[in-house]
Image: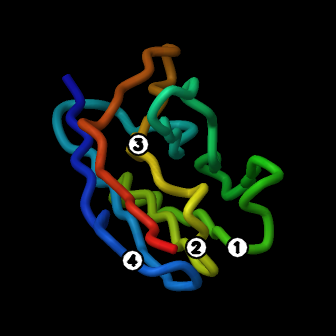
Amino acid sequence: QVQLVESGGGLVQAGGSLRLSCAASGTFFGLNTMGWYRQAPGKQRELVAAITRGGSANYVDSVKGRFTISRDAGKNTVYLQMTSLKPDDTAIYYCFGDSYNAIRYWGQGTQVTVSS
């Protein structure tokens, strides 16, 4: 079983920055793709950014140039550096990790609130 534990959410003013972290633990043989989804009130969950074990990353258009995803592959930890935050970025952010046998694991979510 794999557990994903997130940290780093909080309240920040527009234009500010936050860094989210997600660490995987448990008995597993490593995770392939890891990343972040977010869900704002009344909206569907959307993929924010993802990164493969090899370091290939992709982003939703609305965060390109502002967010950077990275990972420490040896420790199965993924980070999301968020800059120039906007009120529209307010959401619960969920970390995910995909095992090599196509099982997706989820973190519990961390709240990010951006005030105007």
* 3D distance between C-alphas at marks 3 and 1: 18 Å
Which amino acid, mark 2?
Answer: Leu
Q: What residue is drawn where x is 43% and y is 76%?
A: 18
In the rendered structure, are the residues bearing label 2 and label 4 in contact, judged by CB atoms less than 8 Å apart?
A: yes
* 3D distance between C-alphas at marks 2 and 4: 8 Å
Q: Which mark is residue 95?
A: 3
Which amino acid, mark 3?
Answer: Cys
Dot 3 crowding, Cα within 10 Å, few <14, some 14–19, many 20+: many
Tag 1 secondary structure: loop
In the rendered structure, are the residues bearing label 4 and label 1 in contact, judged by CB atoms less than 8 Å apart?
A: no
Q: Earlier in the sequence, mark 2 or mark 4?
A: 4
In the rendered structure, are the residues bearing label 3 and label 4 in contact, judged by CB atoms less than 8 Å apart?
A: no
Q: What residue is drawn where x is 72% and y is 60%?
A: 63
* 3D distance between C-alphas at marks 4 and 1: 15 Å
Tag 4 residue: 12
Q: Is residue 16 above or below residue 18?
A: below
Q: Earlier in the sequence, mark 4 or mark 1?
A: 4
**Relative image position of residue 108 (x, y in whole percent):** 24, 36
Q: Earlier in the sequence, mark 1 or mark 2?
A: 1
Q: Which mark lies nearer to you, 3 or 2?
A: 2
Which amino acid, mark 4?
Answer: Val
Question: Which of the two residues, 77 or 95, is positioned nearer the viewer here?
Answer: 95
